[in-house]
Image (cartoon, grey):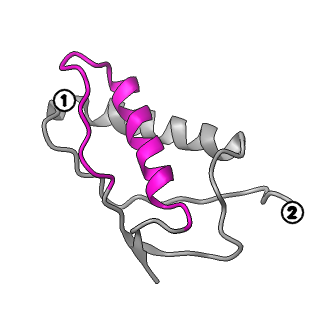
Amino acid sequence: MTRPSRIEVHIEELVLHGFDPRDRLSIGDAVQSELSRLFAEGDMTLPRRDVHIDSVDGGAFVLERAAPAEAVGGHVARRLAASTSPGSQARGR
């Protein structure tokens, strides 16, 4: 199976509770960076066709209070990857 040369992911809204709003851009950048890495390294299962997922519940997680935005974003991205894999509870069409 060949990997696609281009993958487009659009996240309309990422809701995180308990984080400083000033960290939102850094966390978002870290999510993007980690998702890119996961796709590039083949760590994510790719669908064979276009997929639209209405929502993903990544669940609750606990990090150290002073965890840097990169750690938070990386954790969120890995949870998203796990939540959208085959057999997950992601809701889509």
The secondary element bearing badge 2 is classed as loop
Q: Which residue occupies the extreme bottom position in the image? A: 93
The amino acid beneath tag 2 is Met
Q: Relative to residue 71, is residue 34 depicted above or below?
A: below
Locate residue 37, reporting x and y percent: 62, 37
- Image x and y of residue 64, in percent: 23, 20
Which residue is labeled 2 in the image?
1
- Could you classify mark 1 by the number of other residues whose Cα lies within 10 Å: few (under 14), some (14-19), or many (20 or more)? few
Q: Indicate whether 85 appears above or below 54.
A: above
| Residue positioned 39% across, 68% down in the render | 89
Left or right: residue 14 versus residue 5 is: left
Residue 65 location in percent, x, y? 18, 20
Kind of element beneath mark 1:
helix
12 sits left or right of 31 in the view: left
Which quadrant of the rendered structure holds the N terminus?
bottom right
Residue type of the residue flagged with mark 1: Arg
Q: Which residues are magenta?
A: 58-86
Q: Which residue is mark 1?
A: 22
